[in-house]
Image (cartoon, grey):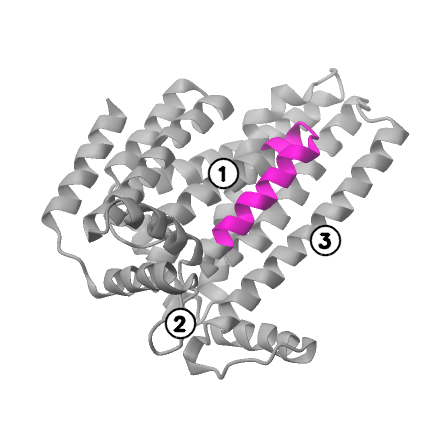
Amino acid sequence: MILGLAFWLRWRFIQTVQLYPDEFVTLLAIEMIKVKGLPVMPSGLFYEHGFLFSYLGSLVSLIDSSPLAVRYLSLGLGLVTVWLTFGVGRHWYSSSAGLMAATGLAIAPAAIHWSGRVRMYALVQLLVLLTIYLAYEGLSRQQARLRWAALLTYLGATLAHFVAVALAPALILASIATVWAKKRINSTAGVNDTSPSVSLIQRRSYLFEILAFGAILVIAFLVKRAGQPKGLEALDSNAADAATGLVQVFNVYSDFSFNALAGWQAISPFYLTLPALIFTSLAVLAFVVCLVQLFKIEAKAKHSNLQFEMLNAQLVTLFLGLILITTTLEMILFVSADRRDDKYLFML
C-alpha cells in the first residue's frame, strides 16, 4: 500500500509538472552518450554531473527516447529506495519502525520531487542508503565482503553526484565510534570474540579497504575536475596536474566559515519543514536515548555477559546519528556558500 501511494504521488508529479532547465541539460548529456559514448557536450565540456545517472538514462532512452521515460527511471529508483527503507528499518529495529520510515519517505515532498525529475538525486539517495546499510552490517558482522560491497556502492554514489564525497568523514567517524563502543562494552563484560589470527586477517582486510576508500575519493575528485568546475581550465594527463586538480576541486567546494548561523539557515528547510520536522524530532530523541542506553549497558556489562546483538539497536542509532550530525556540520561549516542547499542533503 505504501509503495502504491509512493508510486501515485510520483506519477502525478511526472504527469503534471513541466521539465525545468537542469533536466534538459541531463537529457542532452544522455543524448551525447548515445552519440559519442561520453557525456561530452557540443561545446566540448565533459558533463560529469550525474555521470552514472546519465549512463542509466541513456540505456532507458534506447527503449523510449521521450523525456518522460527518463523521469520514470527516477521514479523506479525512488520506489526501490522506499522499499529498501522499510526493509532496513525492519531489520535494524522493527516492522513498525520500517513502516514509519518508509511512509515518511513515500510522502516527503523532496522525495516526490526528485523521484520525478530527470536528475540524479534519487539514484544518489538509493546508493547512499545501500552504502550505509552495507557498511554497518559489514562492521557488525565482521564480514569483509559486505564492506567491499559498501565501497562499491559508495563509488557509484560519488559518480552519481559529487556531494556523496561529504559522506566520507561521516562514515569514517561513525565506523570508528561504533567499533570502539562495541569493543569497550565487550571488554567490560569480559567478552573476547576474536582470536589473534582472525584479528590479524581483519587488520589486513581493513588496510586494503582503507586504501580502496582513498582511491574512490581520488577518482571522485578527478572526475569532478574533468568537468572543469567554476570554469577551470582543462588538465593535462600528467600526475602533477592530477594532484593539482584534486586541490583545485577541494578549494572550489570548500570554504571554512565560523558563521554557523548563516550555514544553518541555508540548509534548515531540510530539517524544519513538514513532514521532515517530525522525523528530525524523532531522530534527535532517538540519538539522546541511544547515548543514555549505551552508558547503562556499559555499566551492566560489568555484571553480565552481554552479546553484541543486545546492543544492535543502540549501535545502529549511534552509527546513523553520527553520520547525520557530521554531514550536517560539514554543510554548515566547511562547504562553500553556493553549495549550502538542502537538496544536497537529500541523500540522507
The answer to whether one can see residue 348 in this image is no
Q: Are marks 1 and 3 in contact (CB under 8 Å)?
A: no
In the image, 55: left or right of 71?
A: right
Mark whose residue sits in front, 2 or 1: 1
* Pick the front one: 167 or 146: 146
Secondary structure of the residue carrying numbered label 3: helix
Q: Which residues are magenta?
A: 137-158
Rendered position, 278 above or below 122: above
Mark whose residue sits in front, 2 or 3: 3
Residue beneath label 1, please? 130
Please say whether residue 294 is one of the residues in the magenta stretch: no
Compare marks 2 and 3 and give the one earlier in the sequence: 3
Q: Residues within 10 Å of mark 3 (few under 14, many from 20)?
A: few
Name the residue at 58% across, 41% down. Answer: 150
Q: Residues within 10 Å of mark 1 (few under 14, many from 20)?
A: many
Q: Position of residue 333 (x, y in %)?
A: 49, 66
Secondary structure of the residue carrying numbered label 2: helix
Q: CA distance from mark 1 to mark 3?
A: 20 Å
* Pick the front one: 107 or 219: 219
Q: Position of residue 68 (x, y in %)?
A: 19, 48
Q: Position of residue 339 (x, y in %)?
A: 39, 67
Residue beneath label 2, please? 337
